[in-house]
Amino acid sequence: MDSLNPDLPPMTVTPAPPRVWKFWGTALWGLFIFAAMFVGQIGGVALLVALRGLPMDLASVQLVGREPQALALSVTMGLPATLAAVWLAIRIKKASFVDYLALHWPSWKQVLFGAVGLVVIVVAWETMSRTLGREATPGFMTDLLKSGRDKGAALLLLFAFSVAAPLSEEILARGFLYRGWSASFLRVPGAIILSSLVWTVVHLQYDIYFLAEVFTIGLWFGYMRYRAGSLWLTAILHALNNLTAVVLTMWLGS
């Protein structure tokens, strides 16, 4: 046996490179995943339209879609659609779903560090908003959340914005997109910036000021994804951020 021959070095086994979509593969699959999320959200509203016996047309979808209950269902239905699309993309690469998305639990120290950084960023933007005489929360979101509270949809909206939306968005941005782009020529810094830009585009319902805040938070989430190697960490931080905003707006906001 060669391994027992002192004149020959021991044989080494080179591990196979991880099966990861690179820049263009990640970008194209990212578009597919985003489209799946959108279809799932529209499907939630269409389901309510059908249950109410309304004609299945654009006018009915727009009418029902304005209701807090419909919006909560729409956001929630985007999650299984996102999961299915991401699972398909990873399955085709024959990679581990858990490892590809870094679904590993973070330590309490990592959660605490990430939360402290998030608080600093949010407080800085809150202070700037007050200095400029701006609303800390977009007006349409304030109206939506308070309307949902008054119409008995508070818990549905709380789940949608504090659980379903963070999971969907983190799986897409800091999960799938970051994983592929960080393995491409972009490396980690480019992946953090580009995935944060994509995440910001998902929030185009906001004005440029709030989009800047979203982008800044996205950079912090991206850094924490890199630092901890855990998507669960960014999902927890995202959920805490949304939960705080929803609760304060619904019950404590002026």
Image: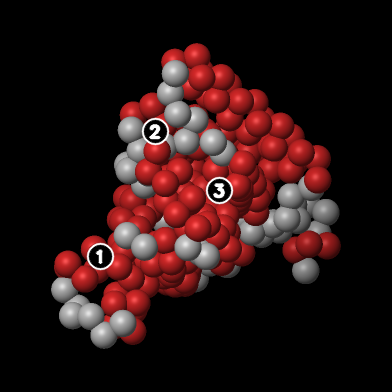
**In the picture provided, is 197 more to the left or to the right than 224?**
left
Observer able to see residue 172: no
Q: Residue furthest top?
A: 131
User: Mark 3 and mark 2 in contact (Cβ < 8 Å)?
Assistant: no
Image disc number at residue 63 = 1
**Residue at (43, 66) in percent of width and height:** 69
Q: Examine the rendered structure and indicate whether residue 108 appears above or below residue 62.
A: above
Mark nearer the N terminus (2 vs 3)? 2
Residue type for callout 2: Leu
**Residue at (54, 36) in percent of width and height:** 254
Q: Examine the rendered structure and indicate whether residue 245 appears above or below residue 157.
A: above
Image disc number at residue 250 = 3
**Residue at (58, 63) in percent of width and height:** 155
Mark nearer the N terminus (1 vs 3)? 1
> Residue 101: image x %, image y %?
56, 57
**Residue at (52, 57) in percent of width and height:** 149
The residue to which callout 2 is attached is: 211
> Residue 169: image x %, image y %?
47, 53
Give the spatial CA distance, label 2 vs label 1: 27 Å
Residue type for callout 1: Leu
| SS for callout 2 | helix
**In the picture provided, is 70 more to the left or to the right than 76?**
left
How many marks the image carries: the answer is 3
